[in-house]
Amino acid sequence: MLHSSSDGQKYDLAVDSLAGSASFKYFGNRRGLTAYSYVDETLLVFDSTVFSAADREATHLLEGLLRHAVRPTDVHSTDTHGYTEVIFAVTRMLGIAYEPRIRQLTNQQLYSWEPVATHRQLGQTLLPDARLDPERIARHWDEVLRLVVTLKLRHSEASRLFGRLNSYARQHPLYRALKELGRLVKTEFLLRYVDQVELRQRIQKQLNKGESAHRLAHAVWHGRNQEFHAATRSEQLVAETCKRLLMNAIICWNYLHLSQHLARLPPEQQAATLATLSPFAVLSYRHLNLHGEYDFSDHPLLAEAPFDMDLIATWQPPSKPA
């Protein structure tokens, strides 16, 4: 089961751009955008995109998950900014368990199929706040299926579809049906979230990996000012993809370096060394020269490959004691 998470970072724009938006909280008197990245439990940054800082992150959440077809996500987490009831519905239809970290749980509502009075008559302590409308879901079920298939086949971007459905003066009937279905899925999740400590810890652990990846992202950004110098969306996506490529190169190098170091240790020391390693060690960067070295001589920078790939490929981590 692969657990992933996604989160956005705000960046200033150094040039005029249609993608830029104003936000005094994040940019002061300037304009900026959001760089949204996806991290899985192995700390691979497997996708990223950029969009206006005025957009809600939840509307773009599905796009990176649907693009990542090599190793599909089984469980996905975000913070509160990534959550909507519609996302609960669509992820469930796509076979993805959506497990966000939601703050202010006391403000969340629980829903049920039966009237609230039915639960009250049964003497239940925990009562739902409202009743779902199953007729609304059934009435638009075929449209819900068509929308999910459209997303699955990537005939249209999720952010574009949700933006259109939510742009009416009154919410589109299909969007309201998705919200109704999402309330059912969200209620089931909230009950598990409150009851299971392990679930809350697992979500927080994965979100911590995303925050650590953000620190690496800031480190590899060239120059002191964390800002985009690209005006068009295509140029901004190129810059964001280059940043992600550098991050994954550092993560890969750290994995190889640590694996080779462990493989060369005596067997009795490997387990003890592994126990002292931080799970975020592969995101370390202070041992690297992030600005590079320039060699204008006729000699190669490295006389030999830095890693013994045969040793790394055959090494097996010591098993944990029973």
Image: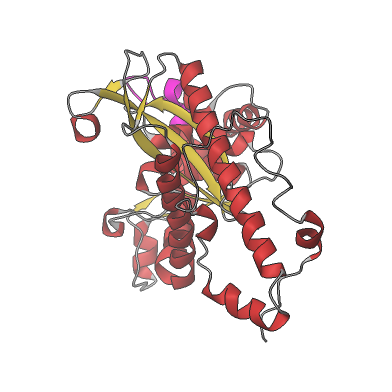
- Say whether residue 243 is left or right of residue 105: right
Judged left or right of residue 116, residue 104 is left
Q: Position of residue 301 (x, y in %)?
A: 65, 39
94 sits to left or right of 123: right
Q: Residue at x 46, y 17 (%)?
A: 233
Residue at the image point whose x is 49% and y is 25% from the top:
239
Instruction: Decide whether residue 167 is among the magenta residues.
Output: yes
Task: Judge whether residue 138 can be spotted in this image.
Answer: no
* Residue at point 51%, 17% (across, down): 234
Q: Position of residue 100 (x, y in %)?
A: 44, 52
Q: Is residue 293 above or below residue 158?
A: below
Magenta stretch holds residue 61: no
- Asked if 230 appears above or below 37 in the picture, the reply is above
Q: Nearer the viewer, residue 291 or 60?
A: 291
Front residue of 183/22: it is 22
Q: Quadrant of the N terminus?
A: bottom right
The quarter holding residue 147 reads top right
Q: Which residues are magenta?
A: 161-175
